[in-house]
Amino acid sequence: MESPGKVSVVLATVFTLVVQGLSLVEFLPAPIAVGVAAVWAALVAVVARWVARGPVRRAWTEDVLVALGATTMALFAFGGAIGLLMLRTALGTESVTGEVMIAMFLPSIPIAILANVPIELVVIPVLLIVGWRPGLRRVLILVAAGLYFLLRIWTYLVFAGARLDFAGAEHSTARLTAAERAEFARGLHVGDPRWLVNLVIFAVFLVAAFGSRVRESRRE
């Protein structure tokens, strides 16, 4: 079994620094945000390399994290598509109010945060190290990590700030005019295509799940 090398640790570290740095900078000064991300990246590297030294725990960890990645991305892809469809449908009616739109949208924020946390903090960075062995699964992990990396940058730089500001605004209970509905559509990004990227990442994790490392190790 190939041991994780420097390349895998560097990839996991860069992933964590950028993704967590962008996330934390919303709440902390940039130097502190980067420092916290660096500490977490170092902790992930230490734990993942320890896991990789035990063939059995490495195989189980890899399989469990791939399954968790597929499950979480399925939630993002299909849940996101349904959520956007509901928002678009509501904005297509003349009786909808700002209060209703905000009530429909706000639950998606904590759900998205809770779903993102395991993927960003554990699943992808640990898989980049633990799953660093020759074969198709390593390629799939790299593809999923690369797509997710680009997706999170896209989210933080384009969507997250506007949506959070919009969600925290005061809105009237009066019926929305056509112009206001159009403004809501822009503010909530109801044409957001990211669910398609989530769907692709889900498919990548799903294919990776068929190459069970536990089953493979039992045949060796």
Image: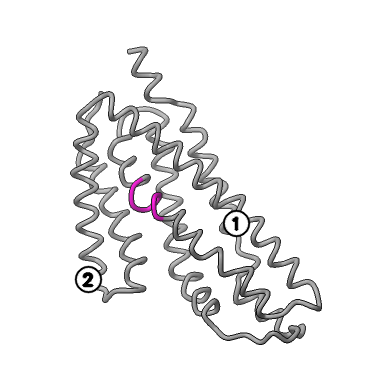
Q: Residue furthest right?
A: 94
In which image quadrant can residue 46 be found? top left
Residue identified by numbered label 1? 80
Highlighted range, magenta:
117-122
Badge 1 amino acid: Gly
Q: Residue at x 58, y 51 (%)?
A: 77
Q: Secondary structure at mark 2?
A: helix
Q: Quadrant of the N terminus?
A: top left
Q: Residue at x 29, y 30 (%)?
A: 58
- The foreground one among 211 and 99 is 99
**Label whose residue precedes the other's in the sequence (2 or 1):** 2
Disc 2/disc 1 C-alpha distance (Å): 32 Å
Q: Amino acid at mark 2?
A: Ile
Image x and y of residue 97, in percent: 72, 80
Vertical placement of 110 versus 220: above or below? below
**Residue furthest out toward the top:** 219
In the shown orientation, is residue 128 left or right of residue 183?
Answer: left
- Position of 173 with respect to 105 (left or right) is right
In this image, 92 relative to 17: left or right? right
State the residue position of label 2: 32
Residue at left 74%, top 83%? 176
Say if mark 2 contacts mark 1, CB within 8 Å.
no
Count neighbours of disc 1 (C-alpha within 10 A) and say few if under 14, some if 14 to 19, many if 20 or more: many
- Viewport quadrant of the C terminus: top left
Q: Which residue is drawn at the image coordinates 22% and 72% (left, top)?
A: 31
Label drawn at residue 125: none
